[in-house]
């Protein structure tokens, strides 16, 4: 009588703690910690070999992604020059989103008010407190479902608004922590966030021009 072959278990890496992640990857870009697993910005788990620290983490997002991120930084920066309300961070600044297992997400651009990080307080060299506003720009290889899941992870952590920018359609989806469907805006619509940035009003197309 033949017996079925039992497949060998797939090896898994142990969950990484916040301290381990920040010590090894605190200065890296293109990586995040999601529930104890080191992943690239597309959510794919990365396995590091002990002698190979410099490995390809994620495909480069491309010119439109970089331009959109720059335009978000530009419009937020101009607004905050006139309304000194808080800080703007970019370049995958780490934000804590879950505690057990721990997660750190890297935001494309985010706004953190002085009420959460006072103006006279030093800016952390590592992760920042949870901000009120996060912008994420879709890269050509990003799955929409993964971006939406990431948006709700931000909201569950205490972010008030997550703005997803979609370069292919020059549109945006504004997700809020209020159990309402996201607000979808086309290129000719204006992005306004009166509860976070009073008076901020930018045509959606301006983030892509």
Image: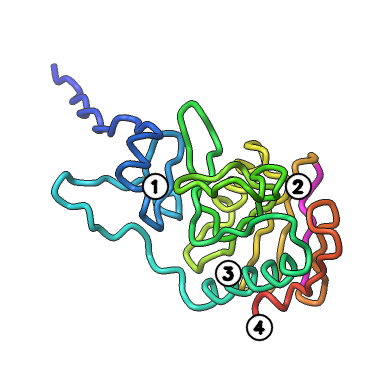
C-alpha gap between disc 2 and disc 4: 26 Å
C-alpha gap between disc 3 and disc 4: 12 Å
**Element under label 2?**
strand
- Please tell me in which quadrant of the rendered image residue 167 appears: bottom right
Residue at 18% across / 25% down in the picture? Answer: 5
Range shown magenta: 180-186
Where is residue 153 shown, x and y percent of the image? Answer: 60, 41
| Residue located beneath label 2 in the image | 176
| Residue located beneath label 3 in the image | 69
C-alpha gap between disc 2 and disc 1: 25 Å
Residue at 45% across / 34% down in the picture? Answer: 35
Return the disc, 3 or 4, that comes first in the chain's sequence: 3
Return the disc, 4 or 1, that comes first in the chain's sequence: 1
Which of the two residues, 84 or 50, is positioned nearer the viewer here? 84
| Residue located beneath label 4 in the image | 209
**Within-10-Å neighbours for mark 3: few <14, some 14–19, many 20+:** many
Return the disc, 2 or 3, that comes first in the chain's sequence: 3
Q: Which mark is residue 39?
A: 1
- Please tell me in which quadrant of the rendered image residue 172 appears: bottom right
Where is residue 192 shown, x and y percent of the image? Answer: 82, 63
Which of the two residues, 109 or 185, is positioned nearer the viewer here? 109
Is 185 part of what is drawn in magenta? yes
């Amino acid at each position: 009588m033949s017996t079925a072959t039992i497949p060998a278990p797939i090896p898994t890496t142990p969950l990484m703690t916040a301290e381990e992640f920040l010590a090894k990857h605190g200065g890296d870009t293109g990586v995040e910690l999601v529930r104890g697993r080191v992943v690239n910005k597309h959510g794919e788990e990365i396995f590091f070999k002990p002698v190979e620290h410099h490995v390809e983490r994620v495909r480069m997002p491309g010119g439109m992604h970089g331009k959109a991120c720059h335009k978000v930084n530009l419009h937020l920066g101009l607004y905050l020059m006139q309304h000194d309300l808080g800080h703007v961070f970019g370049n995958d600044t780490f934000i804590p989103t879950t505690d057990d297992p721990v997660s750190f997400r890297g935001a494309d651009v985010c706004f953190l008010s002085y009420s959460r990080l006072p103006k006279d307080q030093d800016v952390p060299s590592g992760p920042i407190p949870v901000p009120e506003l996060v912008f994420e720009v879709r890269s050509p290889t990003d799955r929409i479902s993964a971006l939406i899941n990431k948006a709700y992870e931000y909201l569950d952590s205490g972010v008030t608004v997550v703005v997803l920018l979609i370069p292919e359609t020059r549109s945006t989806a504004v997700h809020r922590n209020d159990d309402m469907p996201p607000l979808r805006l086309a290129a000719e619509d204006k992005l306004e966030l009166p509860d976070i940035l009073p008076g901020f009003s930018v045509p959606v197309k301006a983030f892509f021009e």
